[in-house]
């Protein structure tokens, strides 16, 4: 079974978007993949601008709560994508990718939409890559 992790510091923006898109892709492609998300210093809530931007594409994040993620959870992943704000040092068998995405917190709706669209593109590309058997 494939396990994917999406991590940022607060788990309140980019990693929440990535997780939602990954869940959607998993369901669309009928994959039995596990998706892990969290932050190293989780916020109290998902950023309002992120909830709004995701609602614009039909994904409801209003009931999501940022959570802390442990190294053990991340060590169980095949691929972990960080959002440009993490300094993870995981076991060498974990494929860690730094997506270096702009933090959407406090950004304008157009800026958040652009970040959202880039997150979606990267998640879809990751699924395509993994389905092709290339890591």
Image (cartoon, rainbow, N blue to C red):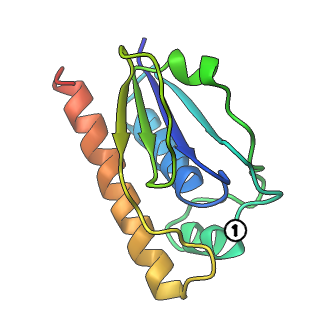
The part of the image, by quadrant, that contains residue 96 is top left
Does residue 46 appear left or right of residue 111 in this picture? right
Q: Could you tell me which quadrant the C terminus lies in?
A: top left
44 vs 27: above or below: below
Q: Considering depth in this image, is 44 or 34 the residue closer to the camera?
A: 44
Residue 117 figure quarter:
bottom left
Q: How far from the left and from the top, in percent, is residue 120?
A: 38, 56
Task: Please tell me which residue is depicted at 52% across the width and 18% down the height of the picture.
Answer: 75
Q: Position of residue 98 (x, y in %)?
A: 37, 46
Disc 1 element:
loop
- Residue holding disc 1: 47
Position of 33 with respect to 130 (left or right) is right
Percent position of residue 97, x then y: 34, 39
Of the pair 67 and 32, the residue shown nearer to us: 67
Tally the marks.
1
Residue 15, given in percent of the width and then of the height, sits at 55, 50
Q: Is residue 76 above or below residue 99?
A: above
Residue that sits furthest to the right in the current view: 44
Residue at left 67%, top 26%?
A: 70
The residue closer to the viewer here, 135 or 55, is 135
Mark 1 burial class by Cα count in 10 Å: few <14, some 14-19, many 20+: many
Q: Residue at x 46, y 86 (%)?
A: 110
79 is higher (above) or lower (below) than 110: above
Above or below 93: residue 128: below
Q: Quadrant of the N terminus?
A: top left
Relative to 120, is 108 on the left or the right? right
Identify which residue is drawn at 48% across, 29% down.
89
């Amino acid at each position: 079974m494939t396990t994917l992790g999406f991590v940022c510091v607060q788990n309140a923006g980019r990693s929440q978007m990535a997780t939602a898109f990954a869940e959607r892709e998993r369901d669309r492609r009928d994959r039995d993949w596990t998706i892990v998300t969290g932050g190293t210093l989780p916020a109290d809530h998902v950023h309002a601008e992120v909830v709004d931007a995701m609602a614009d594409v039909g994904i409801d994040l209003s009931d999501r709560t940022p959570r802390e993620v442990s190294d053990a959870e991340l060590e169980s992943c095949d691929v972990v994508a960080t959002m440009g704000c993490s300094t993870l040092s995981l076991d060498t068998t974990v494929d860690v990718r730094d997506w270096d995405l702009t933090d959407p917190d406090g950004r304008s709706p157009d800026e958040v939409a652009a970040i959202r669209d880039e997150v979606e593109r990267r998640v879809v590309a990751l699924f395509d890559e993994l389905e092709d058997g290339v890591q």
